[in-house]
């Protein structure tokens, strides 16, 4: 099996629905990507964020730099700083906000529903 390498300069920008003041790039993901897991690097400007909505699939957040605030559907507030992570199960309602005057960066990792592995019988066991 080959090793897939991605240089940051090759990452593809995209704009997810419900995000503002966020500049994400797919490190692994996007059109024609068939890997089992997607990885996006999202840069949040001060005041940037993601609207309150459910995550479509289990999602892992890992804050790399700065501070981001997660708000959950029950009104809970969770402040994440560099190297803090969060696991959101499928359907978890959340918003993300950069409430600081500095940019923040976060990795977003989730299964790829378009992956051949997602539908393989052994993947369901």
Image (cartoon, rainbow, N blue to C red):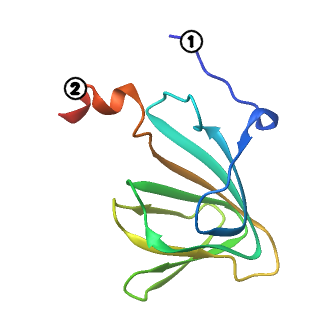
* Quarter of the image where the C terminus is located: top left
Q: Position of residue 118 (x, y in %)?
A: 33, 33
Of residues 19 and 38, the one nearer the viewer is 19
Is the residue 7 above or below the residue 70 in the image?
Answer: above
Instruction: Tell me the CA gap for discs 1 and 2.
Output: 21 Å
Q: Residue at x 77, y 38 (%)?
A: 8
Q: Quarter of the image holding residue 45? A: bottom right
Q: Position of residue 30 (x, y in %)?
A: 59, 38
Of residues 34 and 66, the one nearer the viewer is 34
Q: Quarter of the image holding residue 117? A: top left
Residue 37's label in the rendered image is none
In the structure shown, which secondary structural element does the residue marked by tag 1 occupy? loop
Query: How many discs mark residues in the rendered view?
Result: 2
In the structure shown, which secondary structural element does the residue marked by tag 2 occupy? helix
Which circle's residue, 1 or 2, is located before the other in the chain? 1
Label 1 crowd (10 A; few <14 / some 14-19 / many >=20): few
Label 2 crowd (10 A; few <14 / some 14-19 / many >=20): few
Residue 70 in the figure: left or right of residue 13: left
Residue 94 in the figure: left or right of residue 57: right
Does the CB distance between marks 1 and 2 fall below 8 Å?
Answer: no
Q: Residue at x 26, y 31 (%)?
A: 123
Q: Which residue is mark 2?
A: 122
Q: Residue furthest left?
A: 125
Q: Residue at x 51, y 48 (%)?
A: 109
Q: Position of residue 101 (x, y in %)?
A: 82, 81
Q: Residue furthest bottom?
A: 75
Q: Which residue is mark 1?
A: 2
Q: Position of residue 58 (x, y in %)?
A: 38, 54
Q: Residue at x 52, y 41 (%)?
A: 38
Q: Residue furthest top?
A: 1
Residue 112 in the figure: left or right of residue 16: left
């Amino acid at each position: 099996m080959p090793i897939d390498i991605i240089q940051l300069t090759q990452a593809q920008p995209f704009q997810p629905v419900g995000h503002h003041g966020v500049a994400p790039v797919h490190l692994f993901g996007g059109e024609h990507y068939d890997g089992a897991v997607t990885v996006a690097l999202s840069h949040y400007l001060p005041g940037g964020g993601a609207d309150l909505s459910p995550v479509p699939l289990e999602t892992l957040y890992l804050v790399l730099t700065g501070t981001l605030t997660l708000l959950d559907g029950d009104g809970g507030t969770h402040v994440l700083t560099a190297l803090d992570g969060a696991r959101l199960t499928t359907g978890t309602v959340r918003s993300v906000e950069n409430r600081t005057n500095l940019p923040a960066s976060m990795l977003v990792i989730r299964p790829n529903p378009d992956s051949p592995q997602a539908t393989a019988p052994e993947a369901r066991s």
